[in-house]
Amino acid sequence: MKEVLALFFKWLQSLSALAENSKSVHSSVAKLAYFLYFKNYRLFCAFILHDLHTKKNILFIINPISGGKGKVRIPDFIDKYLDKNKFSPNFVFSEYVGHAAELADEAANKNFDIIVAAGGDGTINEVATQVLKHQKILGILPLGSGNGLARFLHIPKNMRQAIQVINQFKIDRIDSATFNEKSFFNLAGMGFDAHLSAVFSKDKKRGLSGYLKLGIREIFNYKSQQYTLNIDGVEYTRKAFAITVANSSQYGNDVYIAPGASVKDGLLDVCIIKPFPIVKLPLLSYVMLRGKAETSDMIEIIKGKQIEIKREKEGAVHIDGEPLQMDAEIKVIVHPGSLQVIVP
């Protein structure tokens, strides 16, 4: 689109120049060009042409421990594959939980046009929250162990290909949501998922294998809880192993908890995993890996825009996989089309 606009304004400029240099303006097209370019929109055209050729400031915020591998070579990939004709790149490493949010907030105030989260869903959440606040543009380099949102958006795991997505600079708007006023973009929830996230955050071993080992250990001792839900004015009482509120469709690693969810439908999918005997765990895993969760009698999915959840007591929740402690009552609201993000 930008290339088309550039050609149009250059054509308009050349016609108007011919019209200005001739003693009489014979061509009606040249007359129109002269009128548009010189009489009313000359400054506007100059501004557009300048904007089309100005490099955009882009900051890469890199989480060095996402997914369990060092990320010190990421700047080399950026330097090698990023289109320097379009972007003026900078990068910085986050050093602790919450640091990516601080860096993104600072970058937005320094007039960076695009802020890229290079990490997992937790890093993306921190950066995207600030991008949303300042109405900037989010880019994603998926470096985590799950990469739920990136997978939904079809952003490649391959680093070179992911940078090429940024080079193409196609921008879309997606929904965000708040979980007691905390923004999330992929999934948020409570129950076993939140309990496991809290335990996993304290473990030194990162990556998928460490997560699975902890999950197998913790599932034998976890007890389901009673919940009261109000979804768009309709009340439900459920005993649940876990409740996940889904903006997109999966936890990550192609494990689909809400196959019908979309970040562009203005809705959230409330996924209730019912209590189940441990012998059915392989079946539960199978239906989620196959993207068939909505067909299972172990999972109930209800769509809505405004959700209130009351549980037995305060405790752990997860926001895009990152553990937090929250009150017994949770209010969830979707915000349609609120986040600008670079997509394939």
Image (spheres, grey):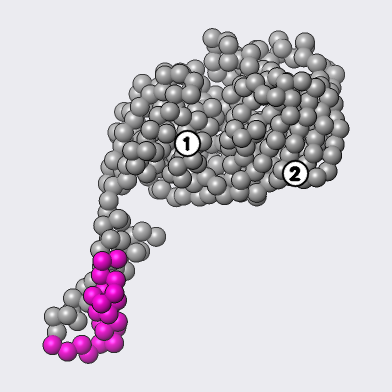
Q: Nearer the viewer, residue 280 or 246?
A: 246
Three-letter amino acid code at disc 2?
A: Lys
Residue hosting label 2:
303
Three-letter amino acid code at disc 1?
A: Gln
Count of marks, rendered view: 2
Q: Is residue 65 above or below residue 118?
A: above
Q: Residue at x 85, y 19 (%)?
A: 277
Q: Is residue 273 above or below residue 178?
A: above
**Magenta part, dominant SS:** helix
Tag nearer the camera, 2 or 1: 1
Is any part of residue 88 visible from this angle? Answer: yes
Secondary element under disc 1, as helix, strand or loop, is: helix
Residue 118 position, x and y percent, is 44, 30
Q: Residue at x 60, y 30 (%)?
A: 320
Q: Nearer the viewer, residue 263 or 75?
A: 263
- Determine which quarter of the picture holds residue 8: bottom left
For the N terminus, the image quarter is bottom left
Task: Say whether residue 55 is left or right of residue 292.
Answer: left
Extent of the magenta region: 23-44
C-alpha distance separating marks 2 and 1: 27 Å
Residue hosting label 1:
130
- Residue 6 highlighted magenta (yes or no): no
Task: Say whether residue 165 is left or right of residue 31.
Answer: right
Q: Is residue 54 above or below residue 144?
A: below
